[in-house]
Image (cartoon, rainbow, N blue to C red):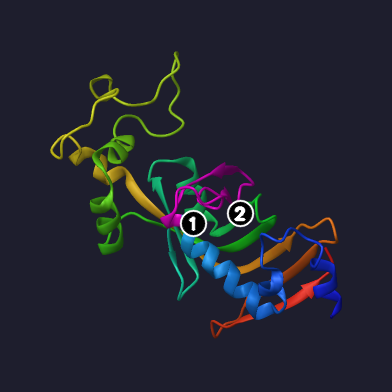
Amino acid sequence: MNSLSHRLSGVAEAEDFSMFETLDNVLADCRNRFIRAPRDRKSPMHAPVVVTGDVDARVMVLRAFDGENWALRFHTDARAPKAQVVDADSRLAVLFYDKGAKIQIRARGNGAILRGGPEVDTAWAASTNFARRCYLGEGPGAVSDIPTSGLPAAFEGIEPDDDQLVPARENFALLKIALTSFDWLYLAHTGHVRAQFAKSDTGKWAGQWVSP
């Protein structure tokens, strides 16, 4: 038994830690977790923390993952302060954590705000009217004298129809993040295990084991 196998042998039997024997295994596991996250609302990685270049952080719902290009996709309001930050500084970080699996992934990449085009149109069309309702009313960060949802009073608890949502479309945008590197950490009482990956100009991932 090699040293890594020995360190993982005392961990809960519910997990198959043989998948972490090689860097290729770890990379494949990360990809599978990213694929599952937007499809499964119960996935612990469904709502990661996204950090913009102004060192501001917020929880966002992962809407899609492009497994070929390793790109994350989120929905956002085009009027949100973070949209302007990303326009000026494309650097982003995304923090994922699966408490049950004891796996943390700290990813970095280059982001872009997409306000129009086929991909945005498709994402808008796939959204429910209740979800689209969020893009009505005043934009994120608008000051109010009272606690407010920011929605027009007419749509508080009410689902708008398609015609009423026409003004909301121009406020809808996508945040896409093309991953360039990430740091994977498995937390274990027998000894943590950590790996780092970076994407080359050819699109290939190179990994290395590092000390936690």
The answer to which of 17 and 129 lies nearer the viewer is 17
- Residue ID at (66%, 56%): 101
In the structure shown, which secondary structural element does the residue marked by tag 2 occupy?
strand
Image quarter for residue 170?
A: top left
Query: Relative to 24, does residue 175 appear above or below in the rendering?
Result: above
Q: Is residue 151 magenta?
A: no
Does the magenta run of residues contain 44?
A: yes
Quadrant that contains the C terminus:
bottom right
- State the residue lying farthest toward the bottom: 202
Q: Residue 96 carries which label?
A: 2
Residue located 61% across and 62% down the image: 108
Disc 1: which residue: 37
Report, in whole angstroms, how far the alpha carbon at label 1 lies from the one at label 2.
Answer: 10 Å
Furthest-front residue in view?
Answer: 13
Picture residue at 45% right of the left edge, 17% below the top: 147
Q: Nearer the viewer, mark 1 or mark 2?
A: 1
In the rendered image, the vertical position of residue 146 relative to residue 54, given as above or below: above
Up the image or down, 146 lies above or below 163; here it is above
Under mark 2, the amino acid is Phe
Density class for disc 2 (Cα within 10 Å; few <14, some 14-19, many ≥20) is many
Asked whether residue 63 appears in the rendered view, the answer is: no
- Residue 23 is left or right of residue 112, and the answer is right
